[in-house]
Amino acid sequence: MARQLTSAALATVLMAAASVVSLSSARHAIHGAVGAEESHHIHMYMHDFSTGPNPSAVVVARGTGTGPTLRGSVDRRFGDTLVMDDTLTDGPGRASRAVGRAQGFYVAASSAGGDPAVLVSMNVLLTSGPYNGSTLAVSGRNAVLAQVRELSVVGGTGMFRMARGYVLMKTASWSGNDAVLELDIHVRTVKSSMAQTGSLPGT
């Protein structure tokens, strides 16, 4: 009986040791595939237009608010929801070189007019350079009257897998429902086997 117990105990120890070795090997494999972090800075301009024959942002739901939440000249009410497919360029002019798209939605999220803000959720798609086709997921509060607003980079795809960082947003120009926004995107990514050499558009 004692010999059987000893054999069972030995088998348990061997299985535990094998599990430790397996876990160590897995951790080593992950460490080998994932290297040091890399920092990236992308500077671009986002053209958000709700007017004209080809608007880049359209209202898909009207809020129930009783008055505008942005500027007095802008017909935006609490709860208004817009879907956007904005052009991203390397300069503030509409004729500047296109480097990507900002696709997502924003909602007028403040019920009081004193501090108007919108909730922004968008994918920043890069369409030029070595990161063509990669995206960054951006979300946060855009306090539209503030000189500088900060949004979060919460993830990404392609060359920006596991990305994290922030976006500093400024208003370059604003007229009625149309605006050009300056974006400074600061991102950290984990260098992996997908990494390539090269610079981002606008860096």
Image: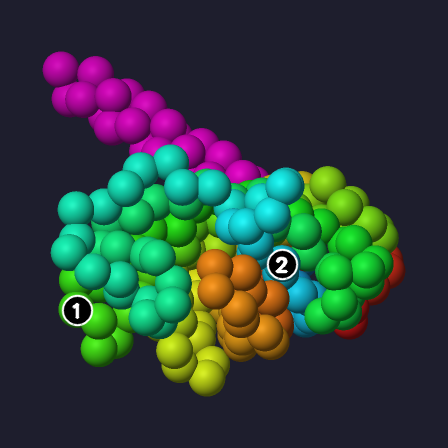
Residue extent of the magenta highlight: 1-28
In depth, the one of 34 and 79 nearer the eye is 79
Q: In x, y percent, where is residue 64?
A: 16, 46
Amino acid residing under circle 1: Ala
Location of the C terminus (image quadrant): bottom right
In the rendered image, which residue does mark 2 sit on? 47
Q: Is residue 86 magenta?
A: no
At a point 73% along the width and 41% down the height, the residue shown is: 133
Amino acid residing under circle 2: His
In the rendered image, which residue does mark 1 sit on? 112
**Above or below: residue 147 compared with residue 76:** below
Q: Main secondary structure of the magenta part?
A: helix
**Above or below: residue 31 compared with residue 182:** above
Give the colour scheme shown.
rainbow
Q: In x, y percent, where is residue 129?
A: 84, 53
**Above or below: residue 34 compared with residue 164:** above
At a point 17% along the width and 53% down the height, the residue shown is: 65
In depth, the one of 88 and 21 nearer the eye is 88
Q: Earlier in the sequence, mark 1 or mark 2?
A: 2
Can residue 160 be seen in the rendering of this structure? yes
Mark 2, secondary structure of its residue:
strand
